[in-house]
Structure formats: structure tokens, C-alpha cells
Amino acid sequence: MSELVLHEYAASGNCYKIRLTAALAGKALVRREYDIMQGETRTADFLAKVNANGRIPVLQVGERFMPESNAACVYVADGTALIPADPFDRADMLRWMFWEQYNHEPNIATVRFWMGWIGEANLNDLQRALLPGKCEAGTAALRLMDEHLAGREWFVGDGPTLADICLYAYTHVAEEGGFALAPWPAVRGWIARVEALKGYIPITA
Amino acid sequence: MSELVLHEYAASGNCYKIRLTAALAGKALVRREYDIMQGETRTADFLAKVNANGRIPVLQVGERFMPESNAACVYVADGTALIPADPFDRADMLRWMFWEQYNHEPNIATVRFWMGWIGEANLNDLQRALLPGKCEAGTAALRLMDEHLAGREWFVGDGPTLADICLYAYTHVAEEGGFALAPWPAVRGWIARVEALKGYIPITA
């Protein structure tokens, strides 16, 4: 396999997903940091060479570039037990990863970014109008996770998969956006199981 | 393989993706229609049995249920040439499918729904405030597709994959949301190639 280079902003949960996947899969990553607060992923050079969409993370494999965090996790975990062999379970893993990007990340990650990076006082009018809906939808996402995890250890099948890694990334720091985890015991138990996995690394590593 | 039942609202591009995948893969689907405008996917029965997230499409495989349109396409296309064998290409196909759900569908599909189903005059204040940003982001998504397709026939590799099917679903009806396709010749050429595929069915089929 070619050298894997992660173009990232380390505090981003989307970037952390890929680092955590690599750590659990025992794969090495070279890391390149960009300051998104200074617009370093919107330069002409970045747009032309790394990602025309102007976003991180991007996984570089040799001379090829792969945006989209969850797709990069699939590439890094290819051939490992983090991707189920059964076709239904494998698609079901992707189901949770698509759900994460549609129902979870735009609410929980966005509110964390607004509160922790931009700052509530600096939100513009549109962000301020969206905030209550995003808080409500983020809480609904945590509720749905808690209901799914009640009586089971992992999102899909009997062991950890990329569905767990991708959902863990922003869930375990949801309180940084003001989302309480205390009401969701099944989620808290699952977070502890992820953190006990062999090879686990924290978001700050 | 168990019988495949598609719980759907036929005019939804997300539902059509799965029908088109099944048609191209030569797989049979049983179809069950719900009227989303009458709240038929938010009933207690639907939430308990089909999808706790209250959304269609859901693919039923025997007694198991799979929400998330793009994940259902992966299950239906398993083992066919619509999913590349090469690990990078396979992850790159998913990259475009995640991008579709994050950057394309929430803009192009949502604006189509607002304009064509709810009606511009009936939008609430928040929807009205979001509309200009969604129109701009939808146009940016079409531009990025056009740039990617310039000089190539398909999104990934040398043949059609699920990336093409999933992006085609809402792109080819984007004008119903007021998005012009005329400025994007590479997108229009690619739409014609999708529509020439053996087994192709239109969204109205």
C-alpha cells in the first residue's frame, strides 16, 4: 500500500475518525495540519491539488486524493474486521455512516464548531436562526442512538465496525456543543466500550 | 436472497436511486408507497416497525430493515460491476455518495421539494432565509460535478458505478427546483450516458 497522508485539522471529529480507524487497524498515517480558521483549505493551491470542495479531511494515497471522512475510513479499514464480511451487515454499517453525515454531523458537529470555535456571540443571524433546530435535531440523533444501543454492544453485528468509529468521533465530544450525554446511558456505555478497544487513541493524540 | 421490499414515496429521488440500481442490476423489487405529504412515515406503526428515523426509503430484506438510500443501493448492487473491485475505486465511489448526501441532496433535493411540493408561497420564515444559501450551494455542487466530469465519462474509473446512479437521481430533475443544467455541458453529457444504460428506467416508471 502507498504511504497514507492525512490532510487535516486535528480538532475536527471528521479528521479524528480517520486517525482512530488507522490506529485500530494498525496502519501508519503521515499528518499534515491546516488551519481552517485561517482559510488554509480555501487557497487556490489547496483547491487545485487536494480538494476542489475546499474541505478537510482528505486522505492522500500516493498521488491520489480522497475527500469525505467516512469514505477514507473505508479505504483505511479495507480487509480488516472493522468492515463486516456479511453483505447485509456491511451495507448496514454504511447505513449508520450515511445517517451520521446527514442527521448527526450537521447538527452535533456544527453546533460544537459554532459554540466552541466561532463563539455564540459571534454567530450571524442565519446561524442564530438555525441553532434551536440543530440543537433539537442533535438531541433527536442522540436519542435514536440510545434506543438502538439499548440491549446491544455495537451498532452493527457483534463487534466494533466503522459505524461505531464514525459515530463515536463527534458523539464523545457532544458536550462541547452543549449536548448532554447524561440522559443516554446506552450511549455512555458504548462510548466506554469504544475507549477500551485495543489501539484506541483519543482525539487529542 | 430474500425478497426485497422498497418502502417508498415514488417521486423521491432517494427512492428512485434504489429502483434504478435494482433495474440496472437485474434485481426484482416489491414496492410499498407511503404518502409523505400526509405524514404516513411518521405514524407510531411506521416508526416502530420500519424506521425509527421516520424517513423513506427503507429497504426491507426478509425481516430486516435498512434505511438510508445510498446504503440500500450498496446492498442491492452487491456483487455487480456497479461496485468497483479495486479498493481505492470502491472507497472513491463511496466518497461521491457521501458527498451527494452532504453537499448535493440537502441543497438540490431540498429546494426541489420546497419549490415543487410545498410551494414557494408556503415556505416558512426559516426556509425562506435558507433558500438563497441552498440555491448557491446547489449550483456550486453542479459546478464541482461539471469540473470533475470534464474529460471523463463516469465519476469513478471507466464505467458506471453507484456514484453515478446516486448523483443522477436528483441531478436530472434539478430544474424542478430552479437549478439550470444548461451551463454544465459535462453534466448533461453524463446524464445522457446514464439514460442510455441497458436496463435504465425513468423516475416516473
Image (spheres, coloured by chain):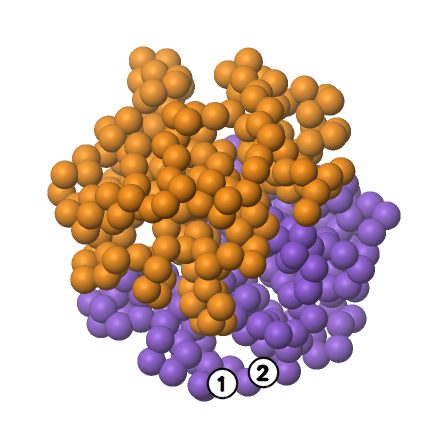
Chain colours: A orange, B purple
* Front residue of A16 and A125: A16
Residue A182 position (above or below residue A85): above
Q: Position of residue B22 (x, y in %)?
A: 59, 76
Seen at 23% across and 34% down, the residue is A179
Q: Amino acid at mark 1?
A: Met
Q: Position of residue B129 (x, y in %)?
A: 43, 32
Q: Secondary structure at mark 1?
A: loop
Residue receiving disc 1: B1
Seen at 40% across and 42% down, the residue is A199
* Front residue of A33 and A142: A33
Q: Position of residue B123 (x, y in %)?
A: 40, 43
Q: CA distance from mark 1 to mark 2?
A: 10 Å
Q: Quadrant of the C terminus of chain A?
A: top left
* Front residue of B173 and A105: A105
Figure quadrant of residue B89:
bottom right
* Front residue of A202 and B95: A202
Residue B27, numbered circle: 2
Q: Does the image show residue A181?
A: yes
Seen at 64% across and 77% down, the residue is B25
Seen at 73% across and 64% down, the residue is B160
**Upstream in the sequence, badge 1 or badge 2?**
1
Contact between labelled residues 2 and 1, with CB atoms less than 8 Å apart: yes
